[in-house]
Image (cartoon, rainbow, N blue to C red):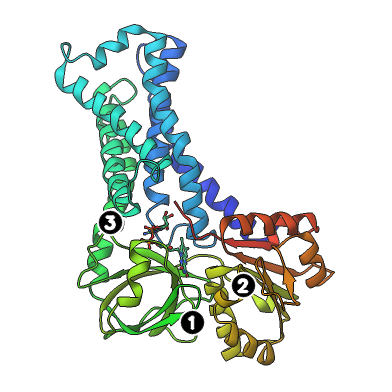
């Protein structure tokens, strides 16, 4: 079993254990008087949902101690996938109770107990808003920044409200010890959420950065060079990424993830290259050198270990070349004997980022460089079309055993490349993907 698979299983076991803790605490304290099976099942669904939601706060908090070998990108993908399930559980809790015993409808009746009815209705409404805004953010016209702020506030409200509800119902949570344990188990994730949204920004204020240079690139892209301002900077590994905020304060909704594009040899000065896509990235060419920047990271497990591989195959599409540039620039400085293969897919030749530097590197590194264009000029005699099985069979080493594969690019290109590698017999555990769309 690979090391990554072992770590993933370890962290999954920790995750499942922590998620089930509220349920375990409740079951360790069975209620004096048992009700019907479905009523008890409905009640326990609520406690299970509370555990899953509380852990959602932990896994989305970008805590660098949480599953570092798994990589933040994978952890956030997991958070996204588990979110719908968590919210279904929370909604299944009142629905099961009310179907099993319509008497529970009184919980939502303001004439019965106004505060309880209003707060439970607010919790159900907040859950629905959380689902809709997460699944259909773009369709409902919510910018990423406002969605993230809303997501944090709603999550805090739902988990804190859910805890209050569980304590007040007092069915599985009677007894001081049970209450104290449940509060402790849910309070930790709530504090971790506060840490990631508030205290981390306060700590970041002690480590400012400055924009040292702004350079235009091909393909509607811009490189920004950042320099540590009065501290030792941030050591990182090639292939990792960070979050950046530009401006006088780190307290901004505009915090964006980018891959380190420069050599990992320097931790006090690094570069990233951004393609103009939306409001933040389109403004980067106008950023003035000297502008303050705030950096959070490094994150990610998209990090090759060339010494442990017979060869590295790097598959990039468009601006997905950035983490791979960091790898190649680092290897050029440090020296490397592991054979490297880079297949770089773009639409048109004019937009191929760093193409002159890549040509130079093909002369300095044991690098086989293959450009593939979907819309090539008439005189083009290189690869044309998209990354597919035929292209990879032609260009990559025949014996893929001991080779590690790193893919970064647009979603369709990454899916096609992963499928093509698997159909060529590459073990999925040897394929590493870096996705730029976390949400
Ligand atoms: C791990 C990672 C590494 C990345 N590295 C690079 C890189 O090296 N070069 C590059 O050009 N792009 C990179 N991106 C993508 C980059 O973060 C987005 O293009 C940028 O945030 C878009 O912001 P915008 O306001 O200009 O565009 P918008 O139109 O606001 O956003 C376009 C899309 O980008 C995503 N996005 C926007 N803001 C954020 C945010 N704060 N956090 C996460 N996702 C967001 C959303 O999916 C959104 O739909 C990376 C993304 C990730 C997750």
In terms of image quadrants, where is residue 209? bottom left
Q: Earlier in the sequence, mark 1 or mark 3?
A: 3
Q: Earlier in the sequence, mark 3 or mark 2?
A: 3
84 horizontally vs 423: left or right: left
90 horizontally vs 362: left or right: left
Q: Is mark 1 within 8 Å of ligand 1?
A: no
The residue positioned 80% from the left and 57% from the top of the image is: 425
Residue under label 1: 262
Q: CA distance from mark 1 to mark 3?
A: 28 Å
Q: Which mark is residue 197?
A: 3
In terms of image quadrants, where is residue 248? bottom left
Quadrant containing the N terminus is bottom right
Q: Nearer the viewer, mark 1 or mark 2?
A: 1
Residue 34 seen: no
Q: CA distance from mark 3 to mark 2?
A: 31 Å
Image coordinates of residue 96 in percent, x first then y, are 42, 16
The residue positioned 77% from the left and 66% from the top of the image is: 391
Q: Is residue 4 above or below residue 56?
A: below
Image coordinates of residue 155 in percent, x first then y, are 31, 42
Q: Secondary structure at mark 3?
A: helix
Q: Which mark is residue 304?
A: 2
């Amino acid at each position: 079993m690979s090391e990554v698979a072992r770590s993933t299983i370890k962290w999954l076991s920790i995750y499942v254990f922590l998620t089930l803790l509220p349920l375990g605490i409740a079951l360790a304290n069975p209620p004096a008087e048992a009700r019907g099976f479905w009523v008890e099942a409905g009640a326990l669904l609520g406690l299970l949902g509370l555990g899953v939601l509380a852990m959602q706060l932990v896994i989305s908090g970008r805590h660098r101690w949480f599953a570092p070998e798994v990589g933040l990108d994978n952890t956030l993908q997991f958070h996204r996938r588990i979110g719908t399930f968590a919210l279904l559980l929370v909604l299944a809790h009142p629905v099961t109770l009310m179907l099993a015993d319509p008497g529970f409808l009184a919980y939502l009746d303001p004439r019965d107990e106004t505060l309880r009815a209003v707060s439970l209705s607010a919790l159900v409404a907040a859950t629905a808003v959380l689902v809709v805004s997460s699944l259909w953010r773009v369709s409902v016209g919510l910018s990423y920044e406002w969605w993230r702020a809303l997501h944090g506030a709603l999550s805090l409200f739902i988990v804190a409200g859910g805890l209050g509800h569980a304590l007040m119902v007092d069915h599985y949570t009677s007894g001081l010890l049970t209450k104290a344990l449940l509060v402790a188990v849910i309070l930790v994730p709530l504090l971790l959420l506060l840490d990631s949204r508030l205290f981390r920004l306060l700590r970041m204020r002690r480590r400012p950065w400055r924009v040292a240079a702004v350079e235009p690139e091909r393909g509607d892209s811009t490189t920004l060079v950042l320099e540590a301002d009065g501290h030792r900077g941030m050591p990182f590994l090639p292939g990792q990424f960070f979050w950046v905020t530009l401006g006088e304060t780190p307290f901004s909704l505009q915090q964006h993830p980018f891959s380190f594009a420069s050599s990992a040899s320097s931790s006090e000065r690094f570069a990233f290259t951004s393609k103009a896509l939306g409001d933040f990235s389109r403004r980067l060419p106008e950023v003035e050198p000297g502008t303050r920047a705030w950096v959070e990271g490094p994150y990610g497990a998209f990090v090759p270990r060339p010494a442990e591989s017979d060869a590295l195959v790097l598959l990039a599409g468009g601006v997905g070349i950035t983490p791979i540039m960091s790898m190649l620039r680092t290897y050029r400085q440090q020296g490397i004997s592991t054979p490297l293969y880079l297949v770089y897919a773009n639409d048109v030749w004019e937009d191929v980022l760093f193409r002159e530097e890549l040509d130079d590197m093909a002369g300095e590194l044991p690098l086989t460089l293959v450009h593939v264009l979907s819309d090539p000029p008439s005189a083009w005699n290189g690869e044309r079309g998209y990354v597919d099985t035929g292209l990879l069979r032609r260009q990559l080493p025949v014996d893929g055993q001991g080779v590690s594969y790193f893919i970064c690019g647009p979603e369709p290109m990454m899916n096609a490349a992963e499928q093509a590698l698997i159909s060529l017999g590459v073990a999925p555990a040897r394929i590493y993907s870096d996705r730029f769309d976390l949400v």
